[in-house]
Image (spheres, rainbow, N blue to C red):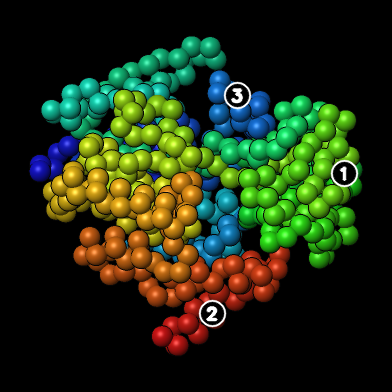
Amino acid sequence: MRQSYKVAVVGGGFAGLVTARELKREGLLVTVFEKADHVGGIWLYNSRVETDLLGLDPNREIVHSSLYRSLRVNLPRQIMGFMDYPFMKKEGGDPRTFPGHEEVLKFLEDFVRDFRLMELIRFGHEVVRVELTDEARHKWVVESRTRETESRWESKEELFEAVVICNGKHTEPKIAEFPGRDAWPGLQMHSHSYRTPEQFENKIVVLIGNGSSAKDILKEISPLASQVHQAIRGPDSQLKRLENHDNAWQHSMTVTYQQIHCARKDGKVVFQDGSIVDADVIIHCTGYKFHFPFLRSNGTVTVDDNRVGPLYKHVFPPSLAPWLSFVALPYKAVPSIVMESQAKWVAKVLSGKVKLPTQAEMADSVEELYRLMEKSGRPKHLTHTLQQDKFEYENWLATQLDIRPPERWKEIMFFSMEKIKSYYGDKYRDAWDVDKWIQEVDCSN
C-alpha cells in the first residue's frame, strides 16, 4: 500500500487534530475540513445558541459547541493529553488540575502550532457530502461549502482516496420522551444550548439527567432559581432534598424509558413519585446522538438507536475499510487515549504498516459483538460504550500498534472517578490532590 494517499479529515477538534498529525507522520496527504474559523471543535466556546433550543428542527442552523461559559473539565489534565504531548500547566495559563475550557482550547492551539498542522486545515469549510464515487479505485468525493455572503454559499467538490470522520458526538441533542412534552407551554431546552444562569432567576426549573452537565448546571442555577427539581433514574421512586441546596430536590424514577411521568398543558410537571410542580423551564441534560448528515453510503453505514454500524472495533466499516473510518466514537473511555490510538491505527493501516483482517473476518467480529450484546441483554444504544472495569479496548489497540499500553495509574484513575466525585462532592475538582494520588497509586503497583 503506497504512502501518498489523499486523505480527508472531517472536523478540526480534538479527534480531527490528532488524526491529522498521525496521518501526516505516516506520509499521507492530509486535508482537514473545519466548519468554524478556528480549531477546537466543541472546545471552541460560542455564546450563540440554536434558534430551536431542543435541537429538533433539522433545518436549524447548528451551533457546534455545547460549552457553557463556566465549564471546567471533569477529568484531570493528567489524563487529557497525548502520549508524547501532555496537557501541562503553563505560565500565564489556568494552573488548576481541572482547568476551564479556555485552557483546553489553548492546549489544542499549541498542539497545532508545535506539529505544524495549520497548513493542513481549511477553515470555514462545512462538509455537506461524503460519497464513494469509484469503488474500484476507492475514490471519495467530499463536497464542502463556504459562506460567501449572509445568504450565498459556494460549494466545491474534491476527490480523496480515504476519509476519516471526526465530527464529534456532542452536537445533536437527545431529548427525553414523556407524555405531554410537545404540548407543555413552558420553555424547554437541551443543555447543548445552556450558556449562563441569569435567565433562570426566580424560575421553577425541572432538570432531567444526572451526568456531569446536569450536576454543573444545577449547581450554577440553584442560587438564582426559585426551585430546581432534578429528575433522575434510580432504584426506587423517591423525593429528597439535595444536600447543600435549600431549594433543590431530586426525584428518582424507576421507569427506564422516561424520567418524568407527564407534563400537562396547564404547565404542571408530574413526577413518578407523585409530586407535582408548576414549572417554568425544563432543561434536558440527556446526552447526544451520533449524526452524520453528510455521509452518503447507500445504507452501508447506518445509525440505529445510536449504534453506528457495522464498524470493526468502532472504527472501520468492513466493506469500505480502510478507505472510510471513524475516530472517537466510544463512550466511557479516556477520550485522548482512545482517539490517539485509533488515529495511529487508521494512519498505519493506510500507510501499509499495519494490516486489517479480511472483510469477512471483520464482519464476523462485528456480528459476534452484536450477538453477545443481545444475549446479555445489553441495549443497542450502548454499542460504543466500553466496559467499565478495565482498559480492554485501549490495550487491544496498543497491541495492534506494537506500543506500550496506557500506564496502570491512568486506568485506575479513570475507573475511580465516580468514587472520587462521590467522596468529595461538588468540590472534587479543587479538593482532590491528584498528584499525591498518582504517587500513592504508583507506589502500590
Among the two numbered marks 3 and 2 on one chain, the one whose residue lies closer to the N terminus? 3
Q: Nearer the viewer, mark 3 or mark 2?
A: 3
Vertical order, 144 against 441 (above or below): above
Please name which of the two marks, 2 or 1, marks the residue nearer to the observer.
1
Toward the front, the furthest residue is 375
* Nearest-to-viewer mark from 3 and 1: 1
Q: Is residue 387 left or right of residue 436?
A: left
Q: Is residue 213 visible?
A: no
In the image, residue 193 lies at what x, y percent?
66, 37
Say the numbered circle drawn on residue 277.
1
Q: What is the C-alpha distance between the residues marked 2 and 1?
A: 43 Å
The x, y position of residue 91, in whole percent, is 53, 63
The single residue placed furthest to the top in the displayed view is 152
Amino acid type, label 1: Val
> Closer to the N terminus: mark 2 or mark 1?
1
Q: Which amino acid does label 2 sit on?
A: Trp
Dot 3: within a 10 Å radius of its alpha carbon, few (fewer than 14), some, or many (20 or more) residues? few
Tag 3: amino acid: Asp
Which residue of the protein is positioned furthest toward the left in this rendering? 1
Residue to which mark 3 is pinned: 57
Name the side, left or right, on which 332 lies relative to 351: right
Indicate the quadrant where residue 236 lies.
Answer: bottom right
The residue lying furthest to the bottom in this view is 444
Q: Please tell me which residue is depicted at 18% across the width and 30% down the height of the picture.
A: 138
Query: Where is 33 relative to 354, above or below?
Result: above
Q: In which quarter of the image is the N terminus?
A: top left
| Residue 437: mark in rendering | 2
